[in-house]
């Protein structure tokens, strides 16, 4: 593998160009770590890579050993593991079940159930289940992010 570093012309934006025959998981992890230091996440649709701002993500879900990023109307696949994406906690993300991490800034309301679980209604009207095991952690994070204000739950 050859690595070339060149200085861009004055005033030009810095960029990284990757020429490869096959984007291996290792290469994608390296690229993602570079990009996440900029605050965005690598996301995939078919063979295209998109860079997603965490604030655009409503929730993240692991299904059949794959991780999906759900935005307002788009769904992307992430090559990262769900536990690796828990580091987004500082951006308002909190684990709400074994397989889901939610963006608390995208939660509009809650619907409690008799089982102890809670349904979170998101601002795009999608609903996700908050397992009773994670309800207290969600409440704690809501108080921290909302400055102690009551968030309707």
Image (spheres, helix red, strand yellow):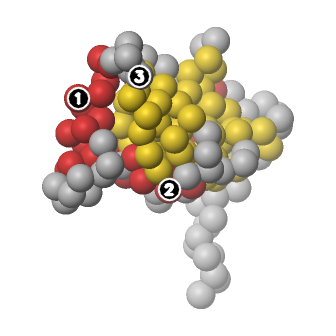
Which residue does the numbered mark 3 point to in the structure image?
Answer: 113
Q: Which mark is residue 136?
A: 1
Q: Which mark is residue 55?
A: 2
Spatial separation of the CA atoms under disc 3 and disc 2: 28 Å
In the displayed structure, would residue 72 be above or below residue 140?
below
Of callouts 2 and 1, the N-terminal one: 2
Left of 93 or right of it: where is 71?
Answer: right
What secondary structure is marked by label 2? helix
Number of other residues with Cα within 10 Å of mark 2, as a class: few under 14, some 14 to 19, many 20 or more: some
The foreground one among 19 and 75 is 75
Q: Nearer the viewer, mark 1 or mark 3?
A: 3
Spatial separation of the CA atoms under disc 2 and disc 1: 23 Å
Spatial separation of the CA atoms under disc 1 and disc 3: 15 Å
The foreground one among 77 and 143 is 143
Quadrant in which the C terminus appears: top left
In the displayed structure, would residue 102 be above or below residue 115?
below
Q: What's the residue at 44%, 34% (across, down)?
A: 111
Q: Position of residue 121 (x, y in %)?
A: 51, 41
Outermost residue, front side:
114
């Amino acid at each position: 593998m050859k690595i070339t570093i060149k200085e861009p012309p004055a005033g030009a934006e810095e960029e990284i160009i990757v020429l490869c025959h096959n984007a291996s998981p290792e290469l994608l992890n390296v690229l993602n770590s570079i990009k996440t230091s900029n605050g965005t996440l690598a996301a995939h649709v078919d063979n295209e890579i998109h860079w997603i701002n965490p604030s655009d993500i409503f929730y993240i879900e692991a299904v059949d050993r794959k991780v999906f990023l759900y935005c307002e109307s788009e769904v992307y696949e992430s090559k990262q593991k769900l536990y690796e994406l828990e580091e987004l906690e500082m951006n308002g993300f909190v684990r709400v079940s074994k397989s889901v991490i939610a963006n608390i800034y995208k939660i509009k309301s809650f619907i409690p159930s008799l089982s102890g679980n809670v349904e979170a209604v998101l601002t795009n009207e999608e609903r996700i289940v908050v397992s009773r095991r994670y309800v207290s952690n969600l409440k704690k994070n809501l108080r921290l992010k909302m400055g102690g204000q009551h968030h309707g739950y």
